[in-house]
Amino acid sequence: MAIKTQGMAPLLQVFDMPTSISFYRDKIGFEVVDPSHDDVDWALLRFNDMELMLNTAYEKPNRPPVPDVARVAAHADTALYFGCPDIDSAYFHLTDKGVALDKPLITSYGWKAIYINDPDGYCLCFHWPYDK
C-alpha cells in the first residue's frame, strides 16, 4: 500500500526571521499562519495551496552578528519552483514591491521564468510552459 500524503512544506533555515517573514509576506504574498508576530524562531507560511516553514539557523542568544558565509553559500543549491501561468504579471507584481530581478526569460527547457533570491540566498523561480 502506498503512503498517503497531502501537501508538502519545505523547511528553510534563515538568518533573520523578521527579514525573511517580511520578504515572503510583503513581497511574494505568503500568509503567516503561525505565529502571530515576526520575531520568532519558527514560522509556517501559506501561499495559495502551498506551505513553507522557516526556522532560524541560530537561537537568539547564539546568533552571530552576521551570517556564516560558508553556510549561506550552500543555499544556492536550494531552489523553490512555483507554477505560475502569468509570468509577466508576477514580474510586474514583484518589481512593484521593490524586488530586484531580471526580465522574464525562456529557459533551455522551453518554460518562461523569472528568478529571484530571498534574503538568505535561496532561489525562487516562477515558471510556466512557454506557448509561442
Image: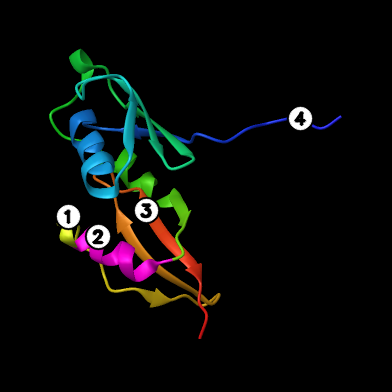
Position of the N terminus by quadrant? top right
Front disc: 2 or 3: 2
CB atoms of marks 4 and 1 within 8 Å: no
Q: Quadrant of residue 68?
A: top left
Helix or strand or loop: what does disc 2 sit on? Answer: helix
Helix or strand or loop: what does disc 4 sit on? Answer: loop
Q: Residue at x 50, y 77 (%)?
A: 130
Front disc: 3 or 4: 4
Seen in the picture, residue 91 relative to 21 is either above or below; the reply is below
Q: Which residue is mark 4?
A: 3
CB atoms of marks 1 and 2 within 8 Å: yes
Q: Rounded to the nearest whole Å, what is the CA distance between mark 1 and mark 2?
A: 6 Å
Residue positioned most to the right: 1
Kindly identify the amino acid type of the residue bearing the numbered disc 3. Cys
Front disc: 2 or 4: 2
Depth check: 1 or 60 in front? 1
Q: Residues within 10 Å of mark 2 (few under 14, many from 20)?
A: some
Q: Which residue is mark 1?
A: 97
**Residue 89 pos. (x, y %):** 31, 66
**Residue 34 pos. (x, y %):** 34, 21
**Residue 55 pos. (x, y %):** 35, 26
Helix or strand or loop: what does disc 3 sit on? Answer: strand
Kindly identify the amino acid type of the residue bearing the numbered disc 1. Lys
Q: Residue at x 38, y 76 (%)?
A: 105
Q: Which residue is mark 2?
A: 93
The magenta-colored residue range is 86-95
Q: Earlier in the sequence, mark 4 or mark 1?
A: 4
Depth check: 101 or 91 in front? 91
Q: Residues within 10 Å of mark 1 (few under 14, many from 20)?
A: few
Q: Which residue is mark 3?
A: 123
